[in-house]
Structure formats: C-alpha cells, structure tokens
Amino acid sequence: MSEINPNDFINFINKKWAYKKCPICGNMNLIVGDAAYELREFNQGGIVVGSGKIIPIIPVMCPQCGYTILFNKMIVDNKNGTAI
Ligand SMILES: [Zn+2]
C-alpha cells in the first residue's frame, strides 16, 4: 500500500496541478514524496487498531518553508471510482 510509482504520480501532478508552486512561499522546486503514508481518524488521542478511517496520502514538500501538500493516494490511483 505504501508503494507508489513516482512516474505515475508525477504525471498525475502535471495533469491536475495547474500552478505548481508552494502556496506559502512561492517556491517552485518542490520535493515529491516517494512513499505513501497514513492519515488516521482522530480518536481522542488514542490509537485504535483495526478500525477507524485511514486516508492514504502522498506528500509533496517545499524544502524552503516546510509546507507539505497531501494528495489522496486512492484518487491518484483512481481506485475509489472517482473520476480523474
Ligand atoms: Zn514554501
């Protein structure tokens, strides 16, 4: 699940992201994540194993200010039926 195809992700970004620059500082040299991560549903600070919503995300980071943009891997992979 954590694996991504960097070329497919970069193609997705180039197709969908009209103005590729950091929305905070304007830097145009962004770092594309090479793995997917989990964004878990908040559960009062506790960790719930085996339940709760998890959103798989792929980060794109700005090395100048640290701002991080998150893309939903399910939509990037088009596995949830959402039209791309
Ligand atoms: Zn920035």
Image: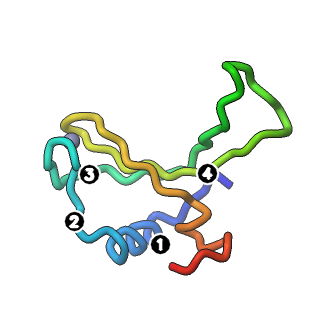
User: In the picture, which quadrant includes the N terminus?
Assistant: bottom right
Identify which residue is drawn at 17% across, 55% down: 28
Q: Earlier in the sequence, mark 3 or mark 4?
A: 3
Query: Label 1 belongs to which residue?
Result: 8
- Identify the element where label 1 is drawn: helix
How busy is the neighbourhood of tag 3: few (under 14 within 10 Å), some, or many (20 plus)? some
What is the residue that sits farthest to the left in this orientation? 26
**Comparing marks 1 and 2, which lies closer to the viewer?**
2
Q: Amino acid at mark 2?
A: Tyr
**Comparing marks 2 and 3, which lies closer to the viewer?**
2
Q: Is residue 9 left or right of residue 3?
A: left
Within the displayed image, which quadrant is ligand 1 positioned in?
A: top left
* Total numbered labels: 4
- Identify the element where label 2 is drawn: loop
Q: Amino acid at mark 4?
A: Pro
Q: Nearer the viewer, residue 34 or 55?
A: 55
Residue 19: image tag = 2
Disc 1 to disc 2: CB gap under 8 Å: no
Disc 1 to disc 4: CB gap under 8 Å: no
Identify which residue is drawn at 58% across, 44% down: 37
Disc 3 to disc 4: CB gap under 8 Å: no
- Identify the element where label 4 is drawn: strand
Residue 56: image tag = 4
Disc 2 to disc 3: CB gap under 8 Å: no
**Comparing marks 1 and 4, which lies closer to the viewer?**
4
Query: Label 3 belongs to which residue?
Result: 30
Identify which residue is drawn at 49% across, 52% down: 58
How busy is the neighbourhood of tag 1: few (under 14 within 10 Å), some, or many (20 plus)? few
Q: Position of residue 5 (x, y in %)?
A: 52, 66
When asked about the image quadrant of residue 43, the answer is: top right
- Identify the element where label 3 is drawn: loop
